[in-house]
Image (cartoon, grey):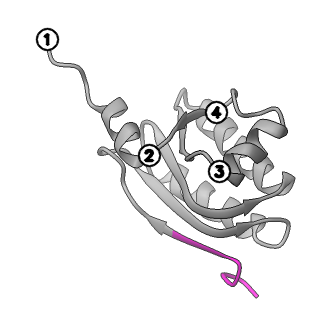
Amino acid sequence: MPGYRIQMRDAAVGGAPALAVSGELDLASAPELSERLEEAILDTEGVFVIDLCELSFIDSSGIQVLLRAMGLLGREDRRLALVCPTGAVRRALELAGVGDVFVLYETRRDAARAFVPAED
């Protein structure tokens, strides 16, 4: 059942386009997120943020979706940033050996501050 295990909404962070994801990201929900991310990436410019603050679970298929999104952005010299607080999802990324592959922020505020140009 689409949308049952995962919810997604547009949620800009510090002026950067973003998608907030909540629920469980697994084999059943990964295709839905992948499709939504591909559309969002094609329709935006600059850094893209995925907010995982309300995600309760991620498996290897979910991690693959995040890696694919990073690859799509990389083709256009764009960056992917993840808002991913300490907890089960961040641990899963670290255990999978990809925690240092992503640009991770603890909070939406931390991410927003990183996208604001420094004043001279």
- Disc on the earlier residue, 3 or 4: 3
Label 4 and label 2: CA atoms lie apart by 15 Å
Predominant SS of the magenta segment = loop
Q: Position of residue 21 (x, y in %)?
A: 57, 64
Label 1 and label 4: CA atoms lie apart by 28 Å
- Front residue of 39 and 112: 112
- Residue at the extreme front: 87
In which quadrant of the rendered image does the N terminus lie?
A: bottom right
Label 3 and label 4: CA atoms lie apart by 16 Å
Asked if the residue at tag 3 contacts the one at tag 2, i.e. Cβ–Cβ closer than 8 Å, the answer is no
- Disc on the earlier residue, 4 or 2: 4
Q: Which residue is mark 1?
A: 120
Label 2 and label 3: CA atoms lie apart by 12 Å
Q: Which residues are magenta?
A: 1-8
Report crowding for label 4: few under 14, some 14 to 19, many 20 or more residues within 10 A (C-alpha). Answer: some
Q: Which residue is mark 2?
A: 107
Dot 3 lies on which element?
Answer: loop
What is the quadrant of residue 71 in the picture? top right
Q: Which residue is mark 4?
A: 102
Report crowding for label 1: few under 14, some 14 to 19, many 20 or more residues within 10 A (C-alpha). Answer: few
Q: Which residue is mark 3?
A: 87
Mark 3: amino acid? Gly
Closer to the eye: label 1 or 2: 2
Q: Position of residue 14 (x, y in %)?
A: 31, 44
